[in-house]
Image (cartoon, grey):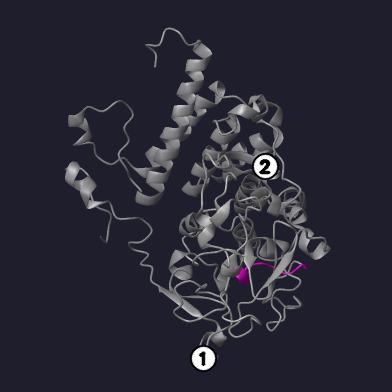
Amino acid sequence: MDQNKTLPQATIARMKAENQFMRAFALFNLSKWYGDVPLPDHDLTPEEAQVIPRTSKATVSDYIIAQLEAAIPNLPSKDQLPASENGRITKGAALALQMRTLLYQGNKMAEVVAVCEKLINNQATYGTYALTPSYSALFSDPATNKTNNESLLSLQYVPTVRTWQNFWDFAPRTVGGRVSAMAPTQELVDDYIMLNGRGIKDAGSGYVESNPYVNRDPRLTATVVYDRYSWINPNNTTKTIYIRPGSDPVQPGLDEYSPGSQSASATGYYWRKYFDPIALSSFVSGNNLHLFRYAEVLLTYAEAKNSLGQMDAAIWAKTIGAIRSRAGFTDAGALSFPSGDLTNIIRRERRAELAMEGLRVDDIRRWKVAETTMNGFAHGAKFATDQNVDGGYIRTQQRKFNPQRDYLWAVPSSEIGLNKNLTQNPGY
């Protein structure tokens, strides 16, 4: 790059910074899954590439942070970015990756707080960020999805030019879905709190198992399709989604739960989040997919402050309280600073807010709870034939997680074959 003699130096510096970010993001993902990974800090010769050893995850993380620190001065803020350049790397995006990298280390919470406070309190320098008024619009309304103050970095799509189609295999069949390739679990549904701020198993929650979806966190309806769900079509008409076996007045009931079905949901739930009302046939969508958004910054800030013993009513109000208010909560019991187990309250909030955004798998690993959450059966709705097994909730998948092995992925044998100095992770 330095050999270029025609581009302005500021342009060269920015392009270098963008590449530093992308390299940092790649190393972040590699170390997240594999732990210690090779750290190529210069252009490797073919001979070096065949013998480069693994570097400790901690050292790789420090390198990521240093690369991002070096990049930030040469990147524009969000407010300096013209609309035609949406999707290019900004100072805010680099800080967001710093935040996530530090958070995943687990022992850098003071540093996490410092990065979050830059994004929260120093927006004149790093860009203006805020929660959008509507949670569902952020993912589904094309105008809000494309232009908002919540996204720090999003994958850019353009209708008919650059599109994605995954929702075709998430939606109910009666509204155009194909097969239910990935369905929400009962465990996810159960983690959405009641409108009064209580968990469904808490005393005084008002939860009724026979009518389980009323008075729940509004993000449940924005995210998950459940039995008798009122699906709003693009023309503002509604269609009731019948999932309980035998309940659809129009037979065959294509959305009904059926054991062993190759097309209906295996859990009795479908997805609503990411629905694009102006999608082309077969849910071909040009909506953006958000990689980092401001709600994650607020959730991370709350988690870090709580881990440091610094959570109070003021921090709660501008983090969890603000997120719940945006979601549609109005009851003081949901918005006021709670007196219960703050760690689990914040973790549950993170699960509800960020559902289907790819972060849950990271969270249960960094919290070291995967051996609990990923062992045993994942469940679906209360539609099982035998109501005496697991309370009648569908057993959909038996999972096994070995904590001595499964917190890291196996290094591919093809990679080990290319580099004699690569070692395998324990247990594989």
Residue in front for this viewpoint, 187 or 309 = 187
Residue in view at x 63 percent, y 41 percent = 151
Label 2: few (<14), some (14–19) or many (≥20) C-alpha neighbours in 10 Å? many
Left or right of 271 on screen, residue 6: left
Residue 116 lies in what quarter of the image? Answer: top right
Residue 127 lies in what quarter of the image? Answer: top right
Label 1: few (<14), some (14–19) or many (≥20) C-alpha neighbours in 10 Å? few
Q: Is residue 382 visible?
A: yes
Examine the rendered structure and indicate whether residue 33 appears above or below residue 180.
above
Q: What residue would you read off at disc 1?
A: 386
Residue in front for this viewpoint, 137 or 322 = 137
Left or right of 11 on screen, residue 147: right
Q: Amino acid at mark 2?
A: Glu
Residue in front for this viewpoint, 30 or 189 = 189
The majority secondary structure of the magenta stretch comes to: loop
Whether the magenta-drawn stretch holds residue 352 is answered as no
In the rendered image, the quadrant that contains the C terminus is bottom left
Q: Amino acid at mark 1?
A: Asp
**Horizontal and vertical percent position of residue 217:** 72, 65
**Horizontal and vertical percent position of residue 207:** 72, 78
Examine the rendered structure and indicate whether residue 130 appears above or below residue 174.
above
Examine the rendered structure and indicate whether residue 277 appears above or below residue 179.
above
Label 1, secondary structure: give it.
loop
Residue in view at x 38 percent, y 38 percent = 59
**Horizontal and vertical percent position of residue 118:** 65, 34
In the rendered image, the quadrant that contains the N terminus is top left
Residues drawn in magenta: 189-196
Label 1 to label 2: alpha-carbon separation? 45 Å
Residue in front for this viewpoint, 230 or 217 = 230
Q: What residue would you read off at disc 2?
A: 150
Q: Which mark is residue 58?
A: none
